[in-house]
Image (tube, rainbow, N blue to C red):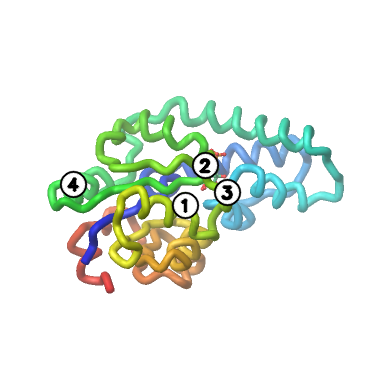
Amino acid sequence: FIEAVIFDLDGVITDTAEYHYLAWKQLAEELGLPFDRQFNEKLKGVGRMDSLELILQQGNKSYTIEEKISLANRKNDHYKQLIQKITPNDLLPGILPLLKELKTNGVKIALASASKNAFTVIDKLQVGEYFDTIVDAGKIVKGKPDPEIFMVAAEQLKVPVQNCVGIEDAEAGIRAIKEANMFAVGVGNEDSMHQADLIVKDTNELTLERLRENFK
Ligand code: G6P
Ligand code: MG
């Protein structure tokens, strides 16, 4: 039975996946590197420095560590600018009702986001009270698709992995959930969710009933 639901943040709870895209696009343009939505799919769920590496590989210039850090900071400055304006109205459809439904049914709730801006975003959305634990991305050694962040979330909740559901919008995230031996729910485009156990087109479709019907 479902004892816990572990949420990804960007693209699941709120549409910050779009802000990450815009911020990376701005940086890529400043560097004269190609960047489009299709390429961006590869970056979803992937940490800041790893994402930067993938973008820089599009060109043939090499950068020192210091330069890379400063480029990553520049992207983060663009991103921080964009998330300033987040309010509770930016919760994706169906997410607040789902959080409430999970709470009233005694299902534990965790956040497993690779973003170092996750606490800020959750704060702005004013949903911190719903989460029994928020994994600190700064303490995670291996990023998605490694299962570490989902395993740590389950450990912190004290729930066995086979009773956990993970919800993701990115291929790397779905792979991480499956590697953690959890039930994987994908939100969005089927093409990037091959391994998901359940795929929904829209966050509106995420109800406890729907999860329970499909959980195995
Ligand atoms: C999430 C997002 C990625 C982002 C990563 C790091 O996984 O899906 O797009 O690169 O977090 O976010 P940060 O805010 O720490 O740069
Ligand atoms: Mg995501």
Q: Quadrant of residue 130?
A: top left
Q: CA distance from mark 4 to mark 3?
A: 30 Å
Q: Residue sitting at 47 percent across and 72 percent down?
A: 194
Q: CA distance from mark 1 to mark 4?
A: 22 Å
**Residue bearing the label numbered 3:** 141
**Dot label at residue 103:** 4
Q: Amino acid at mark 3?
A: Val
Ligand 1 contact, mark 2 (Cβ < 8 Å): no
**Residue bearing the label numbered 2:** 139
Specify whether 83 is left or right of 41.
left
Task: Tell me the SS state at disc 3.
Answer: loop
Question: Which mark is first along the chain, 1 or 3?
Answer: 3
Q: Amino acid at mark 4?
A: Lys
State whether residue 80 appears in this view: yes
Q: Is residue 99 above or below residue 81?
A: below
Q: Choose between 73 and 22: the one closer to the eye.
A: 73
Question: Which mark is first along the chain, 2 or 4?
Answer: 4
Ligand 1 contact, mark 3 (Cβ < 8 Å): no
Please state the horizontal and vertical placement of residue 131, each as a whole percent of the image: 29, 41
